[in-house]
Image: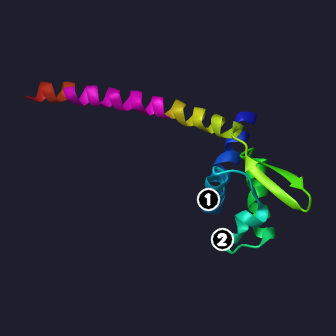
Amino acid sequence: MVQHEVLDRAFAALADPTRRAVLVRLGEGPASLGDLAAPTGMTLTGMGKHVRVLEEAGLVRTTKVGRTRQVRLGTERLDDAMAWIAFYQRLWERRLDGLEAYLTLREGQDT
């Protein structure tokens, strides 16, 4: 159950385009809330809410540096999500391979 809660938080955080854009920006390096908010025209409070969702999902980490809050990537939760996706990708590939083999066999019988 706990694993599903972790994945639910990660996927919910990734569902929002603003939060995905924040992760892309943080791929270039750490940034302050102001740096993240400026290109979007969003207030610091608004960006702070997005960052908090990402932080609760374990996708970013924040630290207070003086009067600013620095945000950086935290990748451990993406590993969980990628493992879940890979499991289902293998499952569906096996099923589709089986369907392809069945259809090929069936096609051979019809001729």
Q: Which residue is mark 2?
A: 40
Residue 110 visible in the shown view: yes
Q: Is residue 36 magenta?
A: no
Number of dots carrying numbers = 2
- The range drawn in magenta is 89-104
Q: Indicate whether 106 appears above or below 27.
A: above
Residue 27 is situated, as x and y percent measured from the top left of the image, at 63, 49
Q: Is residue 92 left or right of residue 6?
A: left
Residue in front for this viewpoint, 47 or 67: 67
Tell me, yes or no, whether the two marked residues, 1 and 2, touch with CB atoms within 8 Å: yes
Q: Marks 1/2: CA distance? A: 10 Å
Residue in front for this viewpoint, 13 or 51: 51
Label 2: how many residues lie within 10 Å, few (<14), some (14-19) or many (20+)?
few
Which corner quadrant of the image does residue 109 belong to? top left
Q: Is residue 92 magenta?
A: yes
Label 1: how many residues lie within 10 Å, few (<14), some (14-19) or many (20+)?
some
Which corner quadrant of the image does residue 43 belong to? bottom right
Residue 85 is situated, as x and y percent measured from the top left of the image, at 55, 37
Give the quarter of the figure containing the N terminus: top right
Q: Secondary structure at mark 2?
A: helix
Tell me what residue is drawn at x 76 percent, y 69 percent: 46
Q: Which residue is mark 1?
A: 21
| Marked residue nearer the N-terminal end (1 or 2) | 1
Residue 1 visible in the shown view: no
Give the quarter of the figure containing the C terminus: top left
Q: Indicate whether 95 appears above or below 63.
A: above
In the rendering, which numbered label is found on residue 63?
none
Q: Amino acid at mark 1?
A: Ala
Q: Indicate whether 103 appears above or below 7.
A: above
Residue in front for this viewpoint, 57 or 101: 57
Q: Majority secondary structure of the magenta segment?
A: helix
Q: Amino acid at mark 2?
A: Thr
